[in-house]
Amino acid sequence: MNLKIAKLPGDGIGPEVVEQAVKAVDAVCEKAGHKAEYTFGYVGACAIRKFGDAFPEETFRTCMDSDAVLFGAVGDPEFDNNPTAKVRPEQGLLAMRKKLGLYANLRPVETFSALVHKSPLRKELVDGADFLCVRELTGGMYFGEKGRKDNGDTAWDTNIYHRYEVERILRLAFDYARLRRSHLTVVDKANVLESSRLWRQIAQELAPEYPDVTTDYMYVDNAAMKLITGPKFFDVLVTENTFGDILTDEASCVSGSMGLLASASIGEHTGVFEPIHGSYPQAAGKNIANPLATILSAAMMFEYAFQMKEEGRMIREAVKASIDAGIVTEDLADGGKAYSTSEVGDWVADYIRKH
């Protein structure tokens, strides 16, 4: 099968980690008899410098003409330190999500037995944790009306949701719960926010259609606490954009490293598969960044974009083997030998070919 993949490395460590994911994808394709065709696209700061646009039309067309997007990261200190910049790298990510209709972000959180000690939480709390965060991605405060008045001294952001946006993400979450352990937790702030009351109302309307799924409701502050004190409670967690952005980063402490967390953004058009960590500009070009989250994002690409579970399993097995064998970058080395970004990528690809 021919797999058309848009390759968007982006900024910072993006090019380095995406290259390692490509190695894993190529190894899987060699073994399974597929052919991967990559088309490069600019996004983020590199796109601003070349085109003056963080998500240029050419990149958008590349994404639309592909079966999946393998994405690195956006962000650059040049823009972070300039509060008056008219165009920012992060606008490229938001534009990509909006134009591709990517209304759902999926972030699986799991623990690796060899790395449980890396979590700041006690082993008995996190060992065996395995849940999926489903975050609404194109609505809410990030996309609502915003502005300033009173000479810039007063600012506002509007957290707006429409029924169709809420219903489609909730249905998706119910469906994923059915594929897992049939437990869905809807996270909101319905005791304070009108938008959250809409979320809870629609969830309660839909729940009877999924009698096989246990549905519960949790305020976001309680959920933030529960992720730390009892992460094994969760199976599928669904929430709105802003809450999801915060909770999914918090959930990274369960696995012990943001360098292990992959994500998929799916919706109306081509899906985007990316690590949840940022561009980490301090490490750019040093060959020290952890590529495993990006490699695991490639596993999600096989599973969700191409419906190839076996190919995804090959990558996941190779990543677990690299961790068990101690073939990891400095953030996971624990004082042992630290391997470079490219060495980890080569080892994972080689494992896939040999097993």
Image: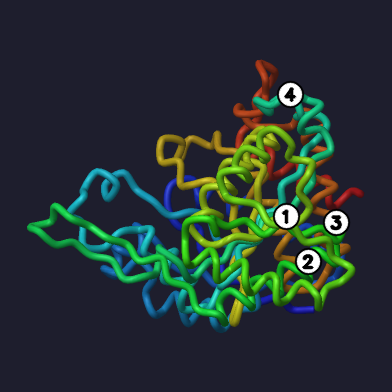
Q: Which residue is mark 2?
A: 176
Q: Earlier in the sequence, mark 1 or mark 3?
A: 1
For residue 100, side relative to residue 232 (left or right): left
In space, the residues marked 1 and 3 are separated at their CA atoms by: 17 Å
Amino acid type of the residue that numbered disc 2 sits on in the rendered structure: Tyr
Q: Which residue is mark 1?
A: 132
> Residue at the right extreme?
355
Q: Which residue is mark 3?
A: 313
Amino acid type of the residue that numbered disc 4 sits on in the rendered structure: Arg
CB under 8 Å between discs 1 and 2: yes
In space, the residues marked 1 and 2 are separated at their CA atoms by: 9 Å
In space, the residues marked 3 and 4 are separated at their CA atoms by: 28 Å
Disc 3 element: helix
In space, the residues marked 4 and 2 are separated at their CA atoms by: 28 Å
The quadrant of the image that shows the N terminus is bottom right
Task: Please tell me which residue is depicted at 53% across the width and 37% down the height of the picture.
Answer: 287
Q: Which residue is mark 4?
A: 122
Image location (x, y in percent) of residue 105: 61, 63
Q: Earlier in the sequence, mark 1 or mark 2?
A: 1
- Location of residue 304 with respect to 260 vertically, above or below: below
- The answer to whether residue 323 of the structure is visible from this angle is yes
CB under 8 Å between discs 1 and 3: no
**In the figure, residue 346 lies in which quadrant?**
top right
CB under 8 Å between discs 3 and 4: no
Amino acid type of the residue that numbered disc 3 sits on in the rendered structure: Arg
